[in-house]
């Protein structure tokens, strides 16, 4: 059942999530409802809480997956593996000297409207700037995703939660 969910349902819920990521609580709850309902259908975890069911099924919350995907997109943009150029979305922080964290820290634009506050290039800055130098300097996308990002979730619970 889990592989069916990952193959058939989750791609629809997460399609182009970096572009349209919801920021209203009501919109996030609509998406979570899908995963909640699925997790209740599994026989051996039906009496557990939602978080416990996800842990037993080895699934991430949808919010964690959205934030993970945002970091992956930034990494792809930095590596030039995206059709979007770095300069189109981001500005490097000139005050970052690389002594704490890494030297590829991003500058966050000031904005007053919610649509710009939650736009991809703004919402990802804080999380990207918290990454270690080793993670940002990963040799490939595969190493970045499987080696560092997934390990980061295990060592720093809550890193991918808003």
Image: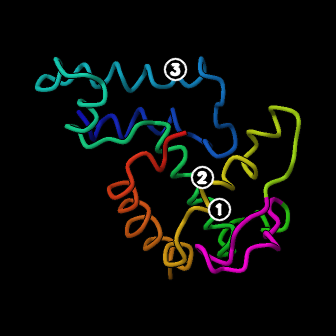
Residue 149 pos. (x, y %):
44, 62
Q: Secondary structure at mark 2?
A: helix
Asked if residue 13 is positioned above or below residue 17 in the image, the reply reads: above
**91 is within the stretch colored magenta:** yes
Count the numbered circles shown: 3
* Label drawn at residue 74: 1
Give the residue at x 25% y 38%: 55
Q: Which residue is mark 2?
A: 70
Q: Earlier in the sequence, mark 3 or mark 1?
A: 3
The type of colouring in the image is rainbow
Residue 71 vs residue 97, the one in the foreground: 97
Q: Quadrant of the N terminus?
A: top left
* Quadrant that contains the C terminus: top right
Q: Nearer the viewer, residue 130 or 99?
A: 99
Q: Residue furthest left?
A: 44
Residue 71 magenta-drawn?
no
Provide the secondary structure element on which disc 3 rests: helix
Gap between marks 2 and 3, in whole Å?
A: 19 Å
Q: CA distance from mark 3 to mark 1?
A: 26 Å
Q: Is residue 43 above or below residue 154?
A: above
Residue at the (78%, 40%) spot, across then down: 117
Q: Position of residue 114 (x, y in %)?
A: 80, 32
The answer to whether marks 2 and 1 mark residues whose Cβ atoms lie closer than 8 Å is yes
| Residue at numbered disc 3 | 29
- Magenta-drawn stretch, dominant element (helix, strand or loop): loop
Part of the protein shown in magenta: 89-107
């Amino acid at each position: 059942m889990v592989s069916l969910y990952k193959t058939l349902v989750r791609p629809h819920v997460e399609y182009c999530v970096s572009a349209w990521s919801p920021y209203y609580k009501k919109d996030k709850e609509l998406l979570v409802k899908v995963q909640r309902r699925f997790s209740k259908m599994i026989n051996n975890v039906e009496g557990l809480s939602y978080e416990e069911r996800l842990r037993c099924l080895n699934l991430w919350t949808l919010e964690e997956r959205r934030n993970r995907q945002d970091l992956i997109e930034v990494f792809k943009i930095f590596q030039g593996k995206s059709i979007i150029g770095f300069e189109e979305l981001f500005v490097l922080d000139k005050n970052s000297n690389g002594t704490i964290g890494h030297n590829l820290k991003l500058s966050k634009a000031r904005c007053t409207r919610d649509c710009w506050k939650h736009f991809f290039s703004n919402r990802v800055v804080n999380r990207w700037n918290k990454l270690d130098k080793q993670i940002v300097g990963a040799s490939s996308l595969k190493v970045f995703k499987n080696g560092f990002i997934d390990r980061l979730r295990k060592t720093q619970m809550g890193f991918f939660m808003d």
